[in-house]
Image (cartoon, rainbow, N blue to C red):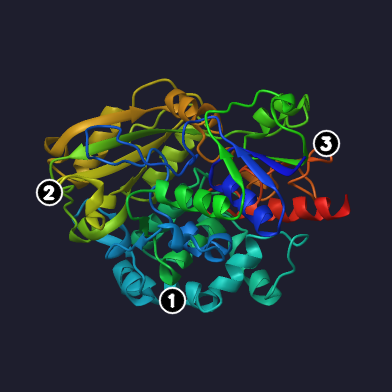
Amino acid sequence: MLDAVVVGAGPNGLTAAVELARRGFSVALFEAKGTVGGGARTEELTLPGFRHDPCSAAHPLAVSSPAFRGLPLERHGLEWLHPELPMAHPFLDGTAAVLSRSVGETAASFGPRDAGAYRRLVTPFLHRWDTLVRDFMSLPLTALPRDPVTLARFGLVGLPPSTWLARRFHDERARTLLAGLVAHVMAPLNGFATSAIGLVFALAAHTHGWPVARGGSQAISDALAAHLRELGGTVHTDYEVKRLDDLPPARAYVFDTSPTALARIAGFGDHYARYRYGPGVFKIDYALDGPVPWTAPEARTAGTVQIGADSAEIGAALHAASRENRAPDAPFLITVQPSVVDPTRAPEGKHVFWAYGHVPHGWTGDLTDAIERQLERFAPGFRDRVLARATAGPPELAARNANYIGGDIATGAVSGLQTLLRPKLSLYPYATPHPAVFICSQATPPGPGVHGMPGHNAAKAVWRRLRQT
């Protein structure tokens, strides 16, 4: 009998399997798709030689992750590449605010009236980031805070809505960049703990950057899988699990799935019936004949570029998708251009680029024209660079990854108390009604992103259970 079986080979399932195997437990991992990866995959979606990331592409949380930083992933081929600028937010006048590795450069891009306010906001946390990120990405029941004073201070700043945090700034440049950072998790700007979301992304950029993985996000998943095999674990792909009886006998079962899928497979009925899923996204992967012709020079060297004319436009786009059940006329866009720093992603002189905008949960329309109109506002002539495009709305995203119900790439709404308390109000969020069954997907704390921490935290709960039996 195996010690543990893990279902789902996304970053969290892989991390949970690795953590258990590191502690000497026998582990087998089962994945429905033909390759491991989940939200961290790389495929030729458009033309031969153009390597795209169907979901996550830039990785500020991965490079900062306590789980990943404790593993020898570089030995298994993972190499982080840092663009000249982690992120840029261009404006219609041809200028841009930037999120740089340098706090000073970032503050200067906001203008003289807000530079000091930004420095005062981030400086108390900068030199304690590695400890802070470990503290707030772990639960008190899995690890006691190493710096409770800084964690409490961060909570005082981070728990209020980001609209409160925006009041610290006089001008729109800083407010707009901050609104864009919050929108990465598709949360309304006035939601609970949205200030923390914006701060996390900013601090991650200043401390460890917003890199891409050389060759694509698949390199992260492949490195985790290689380390798992090195530790004696086994990986089985093309293996769809419809019920617990489909799996070999084990002392524990760990699911990197949505709560809905887990309830169906394990027969938990309506145990997760109140769990809410959020808005979907409409994503386009592009093969380009050259770099994106951004008007703002800063955007040409940034790995990630946020698109929204101002904070009001960003807020309206989020409200339309999450509250009005309609696609926004001017969608807020998150775009990533990996080939500005990684020439292996496209043929010489060509580029890969992706953009996505928020749409209502399960939306079946086509946002292509709205996305490209928005891009043309900040990069005139963009359409002329397009060689091919691959589009994916909520139905296509859900078909590619069963965890993305209704196109929700966060596997659950990041709003209200569910921002922190996922998937249920519980002191033991990784436990389920069955004592031998656990959940480790991004539907559990600390939530969405490629960082492996839900898997890392869940593994702690599992090995404590295994030591008791």
On residue 134, the disc is none
On residue 349, the disc is 2
Q: Amino acid at mark 1?
A: Arg
> Closer to the N terminus: mark 3 or mark 1?
1
On residue 434, the disc is 3
Q: CA distance from mark 2 to mark 3?
A: 55 Å
Q: Is residue 24 above or below residue 284?
A: below
> Closer to the N terminus: mark 1 or mark 2?
1
Tell me the SS state at disc 1: helix
Q: Which residue is mark 1?
A: 119
Side (left or right) of 152 relative to 292: right
Side (left or right) of 345 relative to 363: left
Question: Alpha-carbon neighbours of circle 1 within 10 Å: few (<14), some, or many (≥20)?
Answer: some
> Closer to the N terminus: mark 2 or mark 3?
2
Tell me the SS state at disc 3: loop
The residue nearer to you, when weighing 4 against 167, is 4
